Image: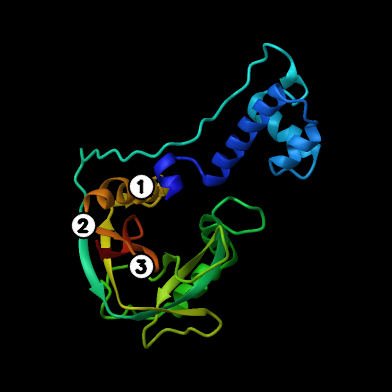
């Protein structure tokens, strides 16, 4: 949600704020560089100096000289701005419990190293053939799903994870003809969803821009004005279309206020 609203990642915002505060301390205290680097989360003075120079354009030592120019990133203040210049198509649907299966990753909300992001998971599965294998094992779409949809979709937040992480899976819906052997299977309980379809687009267009814009509009335009709130539970990226053109449906679990 943070990235959708601010157009920057939480990890980048935290990095900028830490280095802003570090610059203030370099100019206004006599603390050692190594002590300031430790205070703001860096393991060594070298890594701190590298990050500081990348952001400010000079070293921590140079930052202590009078009259140098530094960058400051203020704290973000959130205010709801209701635009509404363009209509949003949506529908409310209640679905009975169903099962999904697929290939998952645990992703980091703060950009911490060692985690595979959703975009990287999609890329990896296309490269190593896992996407095609999951497609072959997906079977027929169940009756409660529109039959012209793709066989593979995205789902996140379907289980609890450690702090600052979230679950994400390339998934297919379980049907009688699915082969779930070797895959993680997850039960999705009955839930009411707000469903937002995108306009049709060519697959070679800026797909992630289309996806992120639809996500952002849900949080910044529809949700603040609706008589609903975001519920706990899984939200879906549902894909449909033809080999040339596609569309996305975003399913968000909701409850009435």
Question: In the structure shown, which secondary structural element does the residue marked by tag 1 occupy?
Answer: helix
Q: Residue 89, relative to residue 34: is it above or below?
A: below
Residue underneath mark 3: 150
User: Mark 3 or mark 2, which is nearer to you?
Assistant: 2
**Circle 2 crowding by C-alpha within 10 Å: few under 14, some 14–19, many from 20:** few
**Circle 1 crowding by C-alpha within 10 Å: few under 14, some 14–19, many from 20:** some
**Circle 3 crowding by C-alpha within 10 Å: few under 14, some 14–19, many from 20:** some
Q: Horizontal and vertical percent for residue 232?
A: 38, 67
Residue shown at 32%/63% (left/top)? 251
Q: Horizontal and vertical percent for residue 119?
A: 51, 55
Residue shown at 35%/80% (left/top)? 98
Mark 1 or 3 closer to N-term?
3
**Mark drawn on residue 66:** none
Mark 3 or 2 closer to N-term?
3
Name the quarter where the C terminus is drawn.
Answer: bottom left
Residue underneath mark 2: 227
The answer to whether mark 1 and mark 2 are in CB contact below 8 A is no
Question: In the structure shown, which secondary structural element does the residue marked by tag 2 occupy?
Answer: loop
Residue underneath mark 1: 216
Residue shown at 37%/64% (left/top)? 236
Q: Residue 110, relative to residue 72: is it above or below?
A: below
Residue shown at 74%/35% (left/top)? 36
The answer to whether mark 1 and mark 3 are in CB contact below 8 A is no
């Amino acid at each position: 949600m943070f990235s959708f609203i601010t157009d920057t990642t939480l990890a980048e915002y935290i990095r900028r704020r830490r280095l802003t505060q570090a610059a203030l301390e370099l100019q206004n205290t006599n603390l050692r560089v190594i002590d300031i680097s430790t205070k703001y989360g860096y393991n060594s003075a070298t890594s701190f100096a590298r990050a500081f120079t990348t952001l400010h354009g000079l070293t921590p030592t140079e930052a202590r000289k009078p009259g140098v120019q530094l960058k400051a990133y203020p704290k973000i203040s959130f205010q709801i701005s209701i635009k509404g210049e363009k209509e949003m198509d949506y529908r409310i649907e209640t679905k009975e419990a169903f099962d999904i299966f697929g290939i998952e990753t645990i992703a980091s909300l703060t950009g911490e190293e060692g985690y595979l992001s959703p975009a990287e998971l999609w890329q990896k599965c296309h490269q190593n053939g896992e996407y095609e294998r999951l497609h072959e094992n997906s079977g027929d779409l169940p009756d409660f799903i529109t039959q012209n949809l793709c066989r593979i979709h995205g789902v996140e937040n379907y289980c609890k994870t450690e702090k600052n992480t979230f679950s994400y899976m390339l998934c297919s819906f379980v049907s009688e003809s699915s082969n779930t052997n070797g895959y993680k299977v997850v039960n999705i309980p009955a839930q009411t969803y707000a469903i937002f379809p995108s306009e049709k687009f060519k697959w070679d267009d800026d797909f992630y821009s289309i996806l992120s814009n639809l996500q952002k509009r849900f949080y910044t335009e529809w949700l603040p004005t609706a008589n609903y709130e975001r519920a706990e539970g899984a939200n879906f990226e549902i894909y449909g279309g033809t080999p040339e053109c596609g569309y996305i449906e975003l399913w968000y679990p909701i409850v009435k206020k």
